[in-house]
Amino acid sequence: MTAPFFCDGLVTLHLADAEHVLARLPSSSVDCIVTSPPYYGLRDYQVSGQIGAEPTPALYVDALIRVFAQARRVLADHGTVWLVLGDAYSRGNRAESNWPPGPQPTGGVGRTGSASQRGRHGCADLPGKNLMGLPWRVAFGLQDDGWILRNGIIWAKTNPMPESVTDRFSCTHEQVFLFTKSRRYFFDLDRVRVPHRMHPQRRPDGRATDAVPRLGQPRQTWSTAARDEPGVDGHPDGRNPGDVWLIPTRPFNRAHFAAFPVEIPHRAIAAGCRPGGTVLDPFSGSGTTGLAAAQLGHPYIGIDINPDYLQLSLDTRLQQPTLTAHGAADPRAGNYSME
């Protein structure tokens, strides 16, 4: 393999096609993969070999399956994969697509475009205005290729971008899939538990007691008991976060402005990567996964086909003085909530 784009012992970046680099990494050398590949048909990154410019959804899915087939060899048996994907609508007219014709090699350069670009997809197998179900097409494709699908998590955006649509509801979520290559794998739920919600004690009729006690009555009390929170396992450190994550989007006012929020890889790494294990993002983009890995004290390997994004990640996220310490941060310190 050619020399890395950047390497300082904690962060290693590769400038090349994702499938090409993964094929040359040592087997079982990575403990956790957190990534968000380019979404289908949403942006032209003007780089040869980009994923997302395929003429049909099926070819897009095939390209990602090939990348993750290489990732499975690189991932340790105890490792986890966290895959963030959004959906899109078909326009049903391939002639209106802004993507260049011809074969599209595999690779990857980043994330989604703006809401104004949604729906600009050529799609040979669907009439126009169809929700294509791309996240689940990819998930089922990876499952058929041997991956174990453990969770289909909903990232519910608390500040979604508005859409100028009047004949359907706007889209306010994306999918976060958890895959493993083995039935037994590293997963530390205690590191990502959410504090119990506080509920007022209930009266026998089910209504909450008055906030201001009447004369002669005891003051209202609060409880974290399981009976006040159905489904809680009673663990003193908090409850299982569940599979709906309420996390705001985070603006990134640079060239790679659609980066996903750092809270997603922060939680994924905290739960799904052994202490000190290596984290990989084969579509590194602006380095959000690398930032989370550094915050938690993990070595990071990033791959991207676009040199501008790799340089951007170094300038803004991966060479900050506060990230050079190897002590792990509290994974519950991020500004997010889970329901």
Image (tube, rainbow, N blue to C red):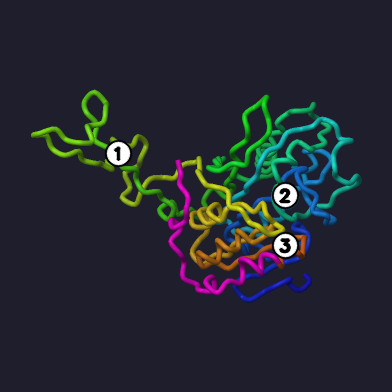
Circle number at residue 12:
none
**Left or right of 195: which side holds 272?**
right
Tell me if residue 189 comes above or below residue 244 in the rendering.
below
The extreme left residue here reads 216
Few, some or many C-alpha atoms within 10 Å of disc 3 (few <14, some 14-19, many ≥20)?
many
Where residue 73 appears, as percent x and y from the top left, is 67, 57
The vertical placement of 183 against 136, above or below, is below
Viewed as shown, does residue 129 lie left or right of 332? right
Q: Which residue is mark 3?
A: 309
**Type of amino acid under label 3:** Tyr
Distance in Å between CA atoms under marks 3 and 2: 13 Å
How many residues crowd around disc 1 within 10 Å: few (fewer than 14), some, or many (20 or more)?
some
Residue, disc 2: 38
Q: Secondary structure at mark 3?
A: helix
Q: Which residue is mark 1?
A: 199
Is 62 within the magenta?
no
Q: Provide residue 247's location: percent of width, then percent of height.
A: 52, 47
What residue is at 69 percent from the left and 68 percent from the top? 13
Kind of residue sitting beneath label 1? His
